Image (cartoon, rainbow, N blue to C red):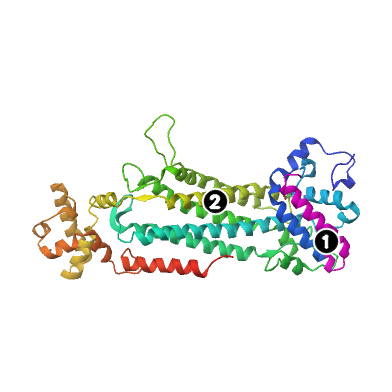
Amino acid sequence: MKNSMWSGRFESQSSELLQVFNASLTFDKLLYKQDIQGSIAHANMLCHCAIISEAEKDAMIKGLKQIEAEIEARNFSFDIKDEDIHMAIEKRLSALIGAEIGGKLHTARSRNDQVVTDFKLFAKEQNQLLQNLLKELIETLLTHAKTHKTTIMPSFTHLQHAQPISFSFWILSYAFMFMRDIKRLKASFELADFSPLGSCACAGTSYKTDRTMSANLLGFKDIMPNAMDGVSDRDFALDLLYNIAVIFMHTSRLCEELILFSSAEFDFIQISDAYSTGSSIMPQKKNPDVCELIRGKTGRAYGNLIALLTTMKALPLAYNKDMQEDKEGLFDSVKNATQSLIILNAMLKEISIKKENMLKACQKGHLLATDLADFLVREKNIPFRKAHFIVGEVVAKADKMGLDLSELSNLHELEPLFDEVNAKRLLNFENSLNAKQSEGSSAVKSVEKQIKILENFLKGDKVA
Ligand code: ARG
């Protein structure tokens, strides 16, 4: 008894244990669209190369489209015995149009090139989806950046108060991370844009096929030039997993800051009720679960990358069944990344920004100390190291008085190098912000430039 498409040489049926263990159908059915797309392109190519007739091609395409409709209407009966989506669809095609014609679809093709083609089409599509979601996220960040150019907040290094910045400047730093993520995705897309279809098992085929034709039909820029590499390559999946890991690294940092900033200790922002959760016991609680989940999912995203890298390590060429393990991690990562970007964007649109609290926080931690030192360097020709020391002494005096530098009315008395007029000018947060001259700084002018860079990027770079 034989029970599989490949069982010609087998004398007995495979065990049920093997069928379940070997099958990927439970998860790779997600690739049904790409599989049908790939088969239609392959059928067209076979006909163009006179390997099948026009009528056979038409029957195949009609059957494949019907199968697509059946799957989408949930009318398709998935059977684990079919092993994977590729065989499930092929079996159904033969049932619909007869094995005489259906059986010809797999000419000049192997499941090895078929599976990697489908998976690559999926990866390319998800890559573009992520690029678009990141663009939408940048747009939201830009909206906040435009309204908060003079909303003063403290910056932190070592999580200790550092220097005054604007909320706009802070949020733009994330927009630039996401811009780089888009650029990284684009670069990976380019590398993935080569079709493996027609590589067959690993050595090519004795039919005179036209791989460029099927590649073009599938939207690939070109073909993989080496069939062995064509079926063995999973770099495109690793690239996407790495891209997603970096996106999560960025969103986890943003989420971490949103969690801190919405705590009672900081109280800089408020996450709207629509994106907050309550506690089952403490009636007063509002928790930032969305941010925590995104931060938490970062671990899975890293894990999926490491898992596939490890699966691929030292794997001999060409196809090995190990490679069936490439899918679930990527499916998991793209699902989590798309969901996370969508909800993060929606949540960010609704955050409220507590200007007064941010300003109040600036009055702790002597944020203006560097401005005082820079003044001594600029106006009094004192070397920076010495200026640093002098201001350090002023800070110590202020501390003893229980005051922040910004609250001092007698700076000129504490340190005669400062006069009253300059002291007043220097001990002002907005002045500190705009005193920055370097490119890329927190000054309003510089922030406006940064907004322009991002706007230009979004304009010139729309992915269709
Ligand atoms: N289900 C397999 C996978 O996802 C398809 C490729 C099978 N090829 C083979 N030679 N058994 O990797």
Q: Residue at x 55, y 54 (%)?
A: 244
Q: Is residue 177 visible?
A: no
Residue 174 in the image: x percent, y percent? Answer: 43, 57
Judged left or right of residue 371, residue 230 is right
Q: Main secondary structure of the magenta part?
A: helix
Whether residue 63 is situated above or below residue 2 in the rendered picture: below
Whether residue 285 is situated above or below residue 137 in the rendered picture: above
Q: Is residue 178 visible?
A: yes
Q: Which residue is mark 1?
A: 108
Residue 379 in the image: x percent, y percent? Answer: 17, 70
Number of labelled discs?
A: 2
Q: Residue at x 77, y 41 (%)?
A: 80
Q: Which residues are magenta?
A: 46-75
The front one of 240 and 27 is 27
Q: Identify which amino acid the numbered label 1 is placed on.
A: Ala
The answer to whether the residues at label 1 and label 2 have Cβ atoms under 8 Å apart is no
Q: Residue furthest top?
A: 281
Q: Which residue is mark 2?
A: 337
Crowd class of label 2 (few under 14; some 14 to 19; many from 20; radius 10 Å): many
The front one of 386 and 332 is 332
